[in-house]
């Protein structure tokens, strides 16, 4: 079993839809949780960064962490075609530790 | 551009050749990380530096791979005797230790070994 699991998709939604992306993990030592967006042939771009359990909102993006269930989510409201990308969840034991990534979920937002 | 930069962006080489990639981190970021990403997968950790000291190496980093950060600023990743399985995107990230900030990634170097 991999440390971080993520539905690879692809996920296709109409413009304006609410998108839910999810990851599960097995290592209870993870304390820091991130979501990165990666466009084709580009490096990952940090979207959200949270510590421990709880919610964090930034514009159209909301990240949720449930450490008791070892489950994290990213919600995208009012999805736009420009949101079409691969979304990578990532986590670390400390803020300075190496980051463990999920395999990524490919998202297409159809105009 | 004050982000992480990587050169070259693309490299095509023949099997058995040596290649070297360079990463310039964000200014004043003293932690520097190397990751490898293959198609359809998330990045996998290779190694990281605190200033010029290499603090951790993944078992993915075979003895054909070597990374340096001689002056604690830019870093190089060298692959000797490349194999077709080395074809991947090599990503560099940096962060500032002593803060709660996370890592910021560069655009990557895409390697194709023929």
Image (cartoon, coloured by chain):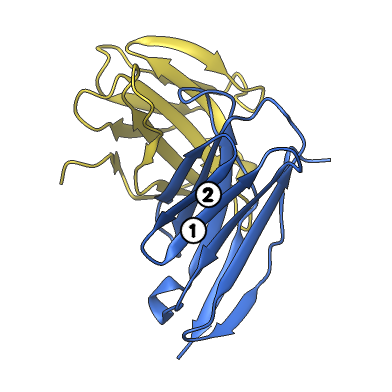
Judging by the rendered image, the residue that carries numbered circle 1 is A62
Instruction: Name the foreground residue: A28 vs B41.
Output: A28
Q: Colour of chain B?
A: yellow
Instruction: Name the foreground residue: A74 vs B80.
Output: A74
Q: From this viewpoint, which residue is outermost toward the top? A: B53
Q: Colour of chain A?
A: blue
Judging by the rendered image, the residue that carries numbered circle 2 is A55
Tell me whether the residue at label 1 lies in contact with that at label 2, contact meaning CB atoms closer than 8 angstroms. Answer: yes
Q: Is residue B52 above or below residue A82?
A: above
Q: Residue at x 74, y 31 (%)?
A: A27
Q: Position of residue B36 (x, y in %)?
A: 54, 40
Q: Tell me the element at label 2.
A: strand
Q: Position of residue B114 (x, y in %)?
A: 55, 51
Instruction: Name the foreground residue: B37 vs A89.
Output: A89
Q: From this viewpoint, which residue is outermost toward the bottom? A: A111
Instruction: Categorize mark 1 by other alpha carbons within 10 Å: few (<14), some (14-19), many (20+).
Output: some
Q: From this viewpoint, which residue is outermost toward the right? A: A1
Instruction: Categorize mark 2 by other alpha carbons within 10 Å: few (<14), some (14-19), many (20+).
Output: some
Instruction: Name the foreground residue: B2 vs A54.
Output: A54
Q: Tell me the element at label 1.
A: strand
Name the side, left or right, on which B74 lies relative to A46: left
């Amino acid at each position: 079993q991999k440390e971080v699991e993520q539905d690879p998709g692809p996920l296709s939604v109409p413009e304006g839809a609410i998108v839910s992306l999810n990851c599960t993990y097995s290592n209870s030592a993870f304390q820091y949780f991130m979501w990165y967006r990666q466009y084709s042939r580009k490096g990952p771009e940090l979207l959200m960064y949270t510590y421990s359990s709880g919610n964090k909102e930034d514009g159209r993006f909301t990240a949720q962490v449930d450490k008791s269930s070892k489950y994290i989510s990213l919600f995208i409201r009012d999805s736009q075609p420009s949101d079409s990308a691969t979304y990578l969840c990532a986590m670390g034991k400390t803020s300075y530790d190496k980051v463990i990534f999920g395999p990524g979920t490919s998202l297409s937002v159809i105009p | 551009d004050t982000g992480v930069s990587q050169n070259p962006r693309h490299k095509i080489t023949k099997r058995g050749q040596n290649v070297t990639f360079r990463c310039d981190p964000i200014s004043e970021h003293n932690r520097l990380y190397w990751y490898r990403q293959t198609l359809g997968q998330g990045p996998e950790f290779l190694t990281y530096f605190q200033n010029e000291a290499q603090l951790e190496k993944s078992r993915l980093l075979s003895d054909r791979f070597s990374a340096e950060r001689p002056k604690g600023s830019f870093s190089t990743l060298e692959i000797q005797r490349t194999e077709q399985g080395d074809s991947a995107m090599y990503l560099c990230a940096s962060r500032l230790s002593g803060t709660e900030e996370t890592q910021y990634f560069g655009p990557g170097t895409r390697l194709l070994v023929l």
